[in-house]
Image (cartoon, grey):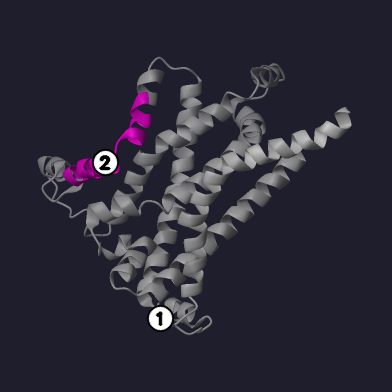
Amino acid sequence: MNNRRRPVALRRESAAVMLFLAPSVLGFSVFYLIPFVLGISQSLTNRTLGGHFTGLSNYAELLASGSFRKAAANTLLFTSISVPLLIVLSLGLALLINKGPFFRQGLQTALILPLVVPVASVVLVWQIFVDWNGTLNAWLVHAGHSRVDWLQSGASMGVLVVLYLWKNLGYNLILFLAGLQQIPRDYYETARIEGAGRWHQFTRITLVYLTPTLFFVVLISIINSFKVFRETYLLAGDYPFDRIYILQHYMNNMFAALEIQKLTAAATLMVLCIAILVTVLLSLERRFRDVLD
């Protein structure tokens, strides 16, 4: 009797699960999946309405565009600089805070506070700080140096990197602290008894058991580096200095010019690159987990 009722109960549970998931699946399909598929189809035509299939001609034209190559190079440069710096700083601060210094609470609050501040408020503060007549130039003049046009010079990339670090440091810090607190203290005590130094404990215990968290933090940091457009757009406008003209600027300007084919082709290429990178990172993390097990 129980065996007969079990399939019925499973079907009821499956129906309940599908019922609860239906709103999320519907929302994801309407606002993400369907537009993305339509975008890919638009990137293969010559115009939005009544267009004809042109294959990869839009992608070839896109790769030949100097503006797109400049935006792609700047985005790659920004990610390659900001993500490693963010990982090193957040991991170092997590190790420091995990030791329990007396200023732990104040440091945590200062680093996590940017997470809850609206982007518009963040940009307003940074505009006041790096403006031609802003606080930073006032300090430079007071110290006997000349003013620097921070957003219209080679220093603009540095401003963007520092803004990204300041905005995302607290989130990575939380993740690293959670990972560090999962490592048993017995491992460190055993290592100290056997004569292992701090570097040996860090490389052989901390990094090994923190690697799954590290892979996740790297992945999230790379994804967040592609979200820096909001800050850059509010800080420097549609056409910023060449050094901080990134992919999202290019796509935003193509949308304003109704160049939908170039916009969708650029978006598809960016998603493809991110997907490849995520696949590689997940594959490496899976292999490491298998070795560790």
Q: Identify the image quadrant of the C terminus.
A: top right
Q: Amino acid at mark 1?
A: Arg
The residue that label 1 is drawn on is 47
Horizontal placement of 29 versus 281: left or right?
A: left
Label tally: 2
Q: Residue at x 44, y 60 (%)?
A: 76
Point out residue 169 in the picture as x, y percentages from the top left corner.
41, 37
- Asked whether the residues under the numbered discs 1 and 2 touch, taking CB atoms below 8 Å apart as contact, a structural biologist would say no
Point out residue 268 in the picture as x, y percentages from the top left corner.
49, 67
Q: Residue at x 45, y 77 (%)?
A: 63
Tell me the CA gap for discs 1 and 2: 39 Å
Badge nearest the viewer, 1 or 2: 1
Closest to the observer: 38 or 255?
A: 38
Closest to the observer: 8 or 208?
A: 8
The residue that label 2 is drawn on is 122
Residue 124 counted in the magenta span = yes
Residue 190 counted in the magenta span = no
Horizontal placement of 13 versus 137: left or right?
A: right
Q: Residue at x 24, y 40 (%)?
A: 121
From the viewer's perspective, is residue 51 above or below residue 109?
A: below
Closest to the observer: 285 or 29?
A: 29
Q: Which residues are magenta?
A: 109-129
Q: Identify the image quadrant of the N terminus.
A: top right
Element marked by disc 2: helix
Q: Amino acid at mark 2?
A: Val
